[in-house]
Image: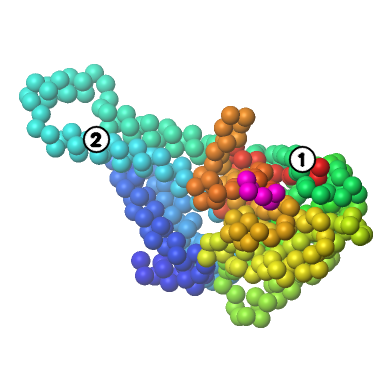
Amino acid sequence: MAAGYFLLQCSMPRYSGMYLAGLILILADIYLWSAFRKRVFSYNLLLKVLLIVIYWLPLAAIGFVLVGADIVPIIEWNDVFRNYLFGFIFVAYTAKLLPILFLLLADTTRIIGRSFHLSKKHKRREINQNQEGITRSKFLQYLGFLSGGLVMGSMFVGMFKWVFEFKVYREKIPVKNLPSAFKGLKIVQISDFHLGNWGLTKPMDEAIETIMNLKPDMIVFTGDLVTFSTREAYRFEEQLKKLKAPMGIYASLGNHDYGLYVSWPDKAAKEKNMTDLFDFYRRIGWKLLNNENVIFGEGNDRLALVGVENWGANKRFPRFGKIEEALKGTEEVPVKILLSHDPSHWDHVVVPGNYPVNLTLSGHTHGFQFGIESKSLKWSPAQYVYKHWAGLYKNPLSQHYLYVNRGIGSIGYPGRIGILPEITLLELV
């Protein structure tokens, strides 16, 4: 156990706090294996070996990641290989979760049943029932295995199909005192590319074509261009240069853009990663707003686009956003739009501070990449972590609006189920 923690601390220090959860996962894996083992060992040698390898392959993959990342830094791995390796691990253990829960329920039911002093008559009835069909505990086990298979199948579809089914969300945003020059202004918002997690480059062409067909006046990107390092973005450079808008393309930084989730050889390497990111934005023609602003129009007919660095309420995330610094020079501008990656910044800073921002654009949550969205129901596990996790929100006591983009890329699980990758068209009215 100590060796495992040491490897995680050396190779991926930002994730060392998850070690206990990983240990619980391994114990659950052993628990589930106990239900499989007897049946597996009843098969012939070849099938037995094959099933053993398949079952323990995800755990072996985790070991490979820990040891491999200590030998070769994870930022130097091939992006496509790393993406699908992490995806396989995630899918495998998520699929095992339901069988583990059902097995736990079956064992609990059996233990409770045995703890009662049953009458002989009841025991005979139970024996007769067992002869006629499967026991309740066996039924729960089979149900768990079936549900695990369905989960795995759905998640693989989410990886190879739904992850690239880009969906356009359209919103008209009421803006108080909006200058006539900006009425009907069309802004396309994209967020959370996580370019290192794209297995293919071809879907990027489809995303860019979709954006350009919306004919935006301005394009904004609200952070997390990459997952681990700037190098991930290079294979998409020529494609991203194709994005154009009359008023320009603007961006803010997300928590992953700072290179905080890998172990760098030294401080200089980490600083170079940020310098490379700034150079990349310049090469593709996007203006990065790091606690600064740009003003459009003249006189009273002006609009300010303000960008802050990442600021997250969760202490795991960096707090480099300085809204007061970003707003300098916009005091007389009637309308202000803020780019802030993490929506918790709106909850904890923008609204409580009553900053003169009409609309805040965020991302970060990904809508958890899993959920249900229909006319009658909107649900995702993201809502238990973030008060505002997808779509348009309005503060009831002011004219502050927040739009949370569901992200166009993915992280952790390289797929989507129910919450599709988003391209947002916002129109000011």
Image point (81%, 49%), residue name: 177
Q: Visible in this render: residue 332? A: yes
Q: Residues within 10 Å of mark 1 (few under 14, many from 20)?
A: some
Q: Amino acid at mark 2?
A: Thr
128 in the magenta segment: no
Q: Residue at x 63, y 56 (%)?
A: 351
What residue is disc 1 on? Answer: 172
Instruction: From this view, report whether residue 351 is shown above or below residue 263.
Output: above
Q: Position of residue 21 (x, y in %)?
A: 41, 57
Q: Is 35 or 106 nearer to us in this picture?
A: 106
> In which quadrant will I find the N terminus?
bottom left
* Residue 64 image point, x, y percent: 49, 61
Amino acid marked by disc 1:
Lys
- Please provide the residue range marked out in magenta: 395-400
Q: Residue at x 55, y 51 (%)?
A: 386
* Disc ID at residue 33: none
What separation in Å lies between label 1 and label 2 (alpha carbons)?
Answer: 54 Å
Q: Residue furthest left?
A: 120
Q: Where does the C terminus fall, quadrant-wise? A: top right
Q: Disc 1 vs disc 2: which is toward the camera?
A: 1
Q: Which residue is mark 2?
A: 109
Residue 225 position within the rendered picture, expressed as x and y whole percent measured from the top left? 70, 59
Image-quadrant location for residue 371:
top right
